[in-house]
Image (spheres, grey):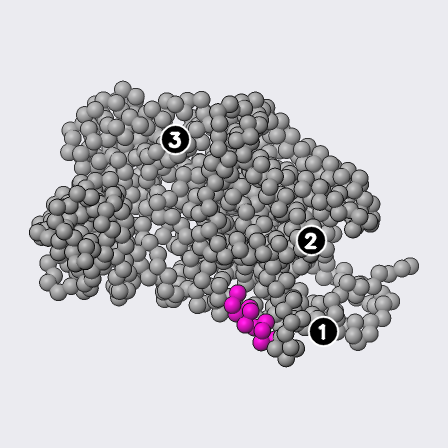
Amino acid sequence: MVINNPLKNVINPRKNNLRKRRSFFLILLLLLLLVSTAGCVTFNDPEASQEYNSDLVGVLDAQSVIGQSFISRRPHLNGITIWFTSPDDQDSPTSNNGQNSLNVKLFHLATDTSPIFTTSILLPTSGNNIPVTIQIPVQANLPGESFYLQFMKDSGSIQIHGRNEDAYPYGQIYYNGQPINADIAFRLSYDYDFASFVDDVERSLTSIWLVFPLMIVLWLPGWLLLELSGLRGRFDFGEQTSISVGISLGLTPIIMLWTTISKIKWTREAVLFFAGFLVALFFIRLIYKNIISKRNAPNLGIKYSSEDRSALQYSHNFNSFNSFALILIFLFSLTIRLVMIRDLATPAWVDSIHHALLTRLVLSLGAYPSSYLPYLDISPTAYHPGFHSIVAAFTWLSNLNIAQAMLILGQVLNAAAVFSVYLLAKTLTRSSTSGLFAAIITGFLAPMPAYYTSWGRYTELTGLLILPAAFALIQLLKNGKSTQRKYWIIFLGALASGGLFMVHYRVIVFLGCLIFTSLVIFLLFRKREPSHNPAWFLFLVFMVATVAVLLVSPWMFQTIESTVLPVINSTGTSSVPFFQDFSWAYLTAALGKQTLVIAGLGLVWGMIKRKHFAYLLLLWTFFLFIIANFDALRLPGGGMINNTSVEIMLFIPISILGGYFLDQLITHWRDLIPKFLVIPVYGIFIFFIGWVAFIGARQLVTIINPITILSRNADIPAIEWINENIPEKETIVINPFAWGYGLYAGNDGGYWISPLSGNLTLPPPVLYGLASDRSRIKELSQRIINLSTNPMALWEFLSSNQLNYLYIGAKGGVLSPEKLSASDLFTIRYHKDGVWIFSLKP
């Protein structure tokens, strides 16, 4: 009997000693950064702001004084942003040296005579509706403390923007010392210091139990399958975690697909029972393995020298240090993501609305809905439902409301991207150090995926967590006929791939392109790997695809028929420019420019070294942009994938190439410096990387665009009131705005009425853009905007369309609560903390 020596591929202990120390430096630095990053970051406070700025509320010149009272909800007020217009045809000269200056004084009360702070800032001499931020020394104010901000000019004039009615409930505007019926548009900011961080940590400890439902949904099913397959031992901790997450995320949508077909409904009790079964199976497996390992403890006949034992010990320590470092990277990334949403009442922007609505339907039916009516008149297969089954499972386990469940789950998924990037980097470069640096780039430096939070792009994010797991499993099949447990590999690869299809249609195309590119590179470089059989590998990949199609066939065939083929058959004839929806800002925000440079260097160095993965990542990106520009090429299928969806997933190849370059930099430095300087140089290099990560983390933590925050905390009890007092069959009119793609969306927290109360809204979630009646909805929304300042005309329009209720959220919009409340055509049904609900009088 031949027993393979497990030390064959063990790294030499002397070389591994340097890696061990390198990892130690990284771990120590991350621990320090976890604490130090928590202080001195400026956050916007949407809850205490009045951001409506479409009206001109006053002209400020040398003969006038304008002020605004307000309350700072958060402690440590440190800034306020206002909007102004500087006329181009001013008769009076500007202040000294032709400069347009604004004098600002901060008081506690409008009646105070001694200001807390005085400053003068320079303004642009011309421009319309320009935001300007006034920096204020950090105030030692308590939460809820009142302030009064006063503006004056020595010469010239500017127009102050805001709202020409008193819609802000916690203050008002003053003109020459007299209160008037209006509000300045302003956005408050505050200093987030270490004490605030500690408060957040203390509050989060009350929710620490959420770790258990999160692990049950995101990790445990995949880990059990990986363990039962016997494949877990082939991967290190980071790879195991990513593959477990990928399999888990793919498994839930497929199970719900087949239970839906079988008419088996999910309930909270059933989900809790199944979760308990998985936990029991987990502990049984651990106990079983522990007993078996003790029984098999006797020597199997291999005699190790002292050097061999030392190598084994170093290998174990190296893996432990890498694992610990990756855990810290994840925890630090998660901390950033959770702090990022401290001022959000619900997930941001418009995508979150239809994600929450579809989750509500899954929760109410215990299955995938066969129709989205009455909310949306679209085919169920027009949109990928997999993510919503995952949110539903977490909601059942955690018993949170849909908005909070999605917000927390979304941020955990965002942080888990560091594991997925690590896995793909390790799979391609075969270097765990490259993987660690790639994880750092994803977690702290690149603007994506952190900015996904600002859009609510949870479905694509979830798909990008599954993609590396599916690809890594398929890559195991390259060993040809000698591959052990190939049936398990085929099944798990198909499970992840099929689940990915259910989660996001575009990302399954990304995976297909990656596999195709891998096959191309494999065939081009096969002479360098003679032990691999291309024909056998192609056959096994085909088997994975076949099993994946079988797993999701009921949904896939309907999707192809009702969604894919109509797009392919509707090839446009109009000229569309290449990269029409490409924006460099998505790649260059935060430390994006620096990551692009590092990735570019990694690509060039990888190509010089003739590394397969460098060509693979380059070709993969090229193929994806070709598909994204099918419209410009006038090819069938244009529009199914756009440049934006490709661009925002580029953090994956960027992080991998950047991680590889940093790994190579460390490796080759060792040969260029004296031995006695190796450890100090490593320490300096790691410290520099940590310092850059610190800078990047400070920018990522405030990366959410305040414009995308629709709801406020005051909207939540108002929607609960709707749930109890307004029949679910009633459609509620909310503040519309022109969102994009020729569609209208809700502008405030009223957009969350459908997901949280079940009532329809006008406008509905933006998925109506896929419906046949989208023209009618667009027309109705535009009419509401046009009639928003005329209560009589608005009443007639609403009455003729059987629309009996209006909702104006705390953020506000075009609908005027003052004019509606003053009219005898509307009844105030609810008014609290800036939220208004009106009904039409007969």
Q: Which residues are magenta?
A: 679-689
Q: Position of residue 714 (x, y in %)?
A: 30, 46
Disc 2 packing (10 Å; few <14; some 14–19; many ≥20): some
Q: Which mark is residue 743?
A: 3
Identify which amino acid the numbered label 1 is placed on: Arg
Q: Is residue 226 visible?
A: no
675 vs 699, nearest the viewer: 675
Q: Is residue 23 visible?
A: yes
Identify which amino acid the numbered label 3 is placed on: Leu
In this view, the residue farthest toward the front is 97
> Which residue: 87% across, 67% down?
301
Residue assigned mark 1: 14
Identify which amino acid the numbered label 2 is placed on: Lys
Residue assigned mark 2: 611
Q: Position of residue 498 (x, y in %)?
A: 64, 37
* Marks 3 and 1 close (CB-CB < 8 Å): no
